[in-house]
Amino acid sequence: MYTEREPRKALHRLQLGIKRLFDVLVSLLVLILGLPLFAILAVLVRLSSPGPVFFVQERAGKDGRPFRIYKFRTMTVAPPGYQTTRWNAAEEARITPIGGFLRDYGLDELPQAINILKGDMSVVGPRPRLPMQVRDYDERQRKVFQMRPGIVCLSAFQGRRSIPVEARIELQVQYVETWSLWLDLVILARTIPVVLGRKDARDILAS
């Protein structure tokens, strides 16, 4: 039986299809045109301090499935057994000079174009969290898993680390509940000038 919800569902699926197409095109563009920049940044990271070029870590993705996220390494290699889920002064002290530059302009996130192309992530979406950080999510909070995690998120414009963790999670849930292509465009439009101006860029593009 035909219901009023069917056109809405069809429109939602269409928008999701457009969102995925945009993600694929952007990631291909970054990977192809950005290849020379990737090579330069890889050399700089390798020379900045001992350790690998890329930072690879497991995160919780769509439907809660784990995936491996890729970034340019911006910090010194952590000692064996070191693990933390919170940003603190000790973490800040580990950022290398080139790492600070990469974070200021969001360049450390460029390798995530691979994650986007693979379908693990989207350009805009809830920030991908560590599996241990989402184990205690309640039913409503787990709505964040209905969409692919993104490089840019809604909570970046609401105070990021200056607001409590629970409030940040709530903003991610609200993003999923109110999502539209227009919302993604608004988030992108507000992100670009902030990153280019380096104003709070580390907070907006950090996780």
Image (cartoon, rainbow, N blue to C red):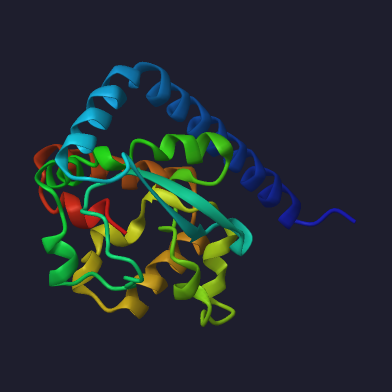
Q: Left or right? Give the position of 158 relative to 56.
A: left
Q: Left or right? Give the position of 92 relative to 171.
A: left
Q: For this rendering, which residue is in front, 158 or 196?
A: 196
Residue drawn where x is 48% and y is 44% of the image: 122
x, y percent for residue 46: 23, 36
- Counting the numbered discs, the total is 0
Q: Left or right? Give the position of 190 relative to 58.
A: left
Residue drawn where x is 36% and y is 71% of the image: 81
* 22 vs 153: above or below: above
x, y percent for residue 17: 61, 37
x, y percent for residue 106: 24, 42
Q: Quadrant of residue 31?
A: top left
Image quarter where the C terminus lies is bottom left
Q: Residue furthest right?
A: 1
Residue drawn where x is 32% and y is 73% of the image: 84
x, y percent for residue 86: 28, 73
Q: For this rendering, which residue is in front, 27 or 102?
A: 102
* 202 vs 160: above or below: above
Q: Quadrant of residue 158?
A: bottom left
Residue drawn where x is 55% and y is 82% of the image: 138
Image quarter where the N terminus lies is bottom right
